[in-house]
Image (cartoon, rainbow, N blue to C red):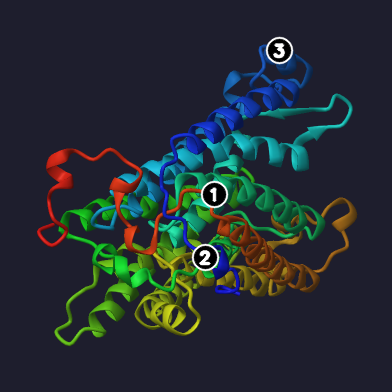
Amino acid sequence: MGNCCAYLGPQKNTNVRVSLPAVCFVWQIAMIVLFGVFIRYNPESDAHWVEHMRTENISSDIENDFYYRYPSFQDVHVMIFVGFGFLMTFLKRYSFGGVGFNFLIASFGLQWALLMQGWFHFLDHSTGKIYIGVENLINADFCCAGSLIAYGALLGKVSPVQLMVVTLFGVTLFAVEEYIILHLLHCRDAGGSMVIHAFGGYYGLAISWVLYRPNLHLSKRLNGSVYHSDVFAMIGTLFLWMFWPSFNSAITDHGDGQHRAAINTYLALASTVLTTVAISSMSQKKGKLDMVHIQNATLAGGVAMGTAAEFMISPYGSLIVGFCTGIISTFGYLFVTPFLENKLKLQDTCGVHNLHAVPGMLGGFIGAIVAAAASEEVYSREGLIDVFDFEGKHANRTVGTQGGYQAAGTCVAIAFGLVGGAIVGFILKFPIWGDPADDNCYDDEVYWEVRLAESNFSVEQS
């Protein structure tokens, strides 16, 4: 499939002077119009808050959800713009593109996400309006994360216009699969192992497979890092690593669920670092560490803990999850990524298969196993109802059934990623997007003004 559209040929003209401004202006104007029609403040962010307090017998402004959620929102927001952005600055000549295009597509994606998620989850059918507050902002950032993960597989090989298209469809697909998984199947996925990481990872991989470049080796000289670019990428790693407990706990229920999610993620991440370092050292004859592994595989525990973060997996269970995913992710960078490129013709620039797709899939199935093994002895009857929302039409659902639905939700996320990514990949095949030629990838000078002194500095010297 990756080669079946080869007749369209590579696009050599990278001039996006018309297409990029057109897309940005038209789509931003569309956002303004749609927000004007649909988006309104919710009661906790509206000027009628004082009346709402009186009606709901709320005694203090501190009970506004803003004060509970905003610290988590700040952390998640930093992860999206600083963490993901700087993680993708490892390429020696593509730092502007890594952090700059991340900035662009996240800024568009969060607006589109507020609308898409609003239509599916928060639309008031009596008024036809979407009422937003701080929790909507967190969910919109989560929605953007799926497209940013996909960008990692495409890094350096696509134009900014293509990335806007990837984000438009990515956010749309995310909102649909999220609605199916969380509402129709009634799965629990606080940290998004399924809906964010498995979907985003396989979405990016499917697009990359369809957009396979047979002559990408012509840009091989640029597909690597230098000392300072790896240091910048480690900034992204550390921001992601530190704030991942907030990511996994941001939208869980207040109280024990949020507290437990932060603890479980914290422990899984710590365990992942040690096993990543161990496998990275073992893989080299002299025991030296590979910065690729340290930048990426050390985060896999946070991905794998996403679904089960609020469950009673126990502290030692969190360490086991981190221990195993650190090994699996590092082995992925050592062996799976070369296999995918050489045998399956899948070019994955950032290795999202090893950091997001597989750990996300494992996280979904770990959540299914932990859910199926839940008991009143461990959770208490009230705890089971609270953690798994066994209320209303789901009041009679058993933990075994919940585990089955959790596993089904993981499969739905993967299917949406693969099928949706393949379709979007075919759309991006058409020679209208200003994407670079095979011998012109991974270079900021294609789409950015780079200072003369820098542009004259040879790649070999850098």
Q: Which mark is residue 432?
A: 1
Q: Nearer the viewer, residue 418 or 397?
A: 418
Query: Do we see residue 242 in this rendering?
Result: yes
Q: Is residue 281 above or below residue 116?
A: below
Q: Position of residue 89 (x, y in %)?
A: 30, 52
Cβ atoms under marks 1 and 2 closer than 8 Å? no
- How many C-alpha atoms fall within 10 Å of the one at disc 3: few (<14), some, or many (≥20)? few
In the picture of the structure, the residue carrying the numbered disc 3 is 48
Residue at 13% over, 62% down: 460
- What residue does disc 2 label? 211
Q: Is residue 38 left or right of residue 252?
A: right
The secondary element bearing badge 2 is classed as loop
Q: Give the residue furthest to the left.
A: 461
Give the mark toward the camera: 3 or 1. Answer: 1
From mark 3 to mark 1, how far is it between C-alphas? Answer: 49 Å
State which mark lies toward you, 2 or 3. 2
Lower position in the chain sequence, tag 3 or tag 1: 3
Of callouts 2 and 3, the N-terminal one: 3
- Residue type indicated by callout 1: Ile
Up the image or down, 142 lies above or below 212; here it is above
Amino acid at dot 3? His
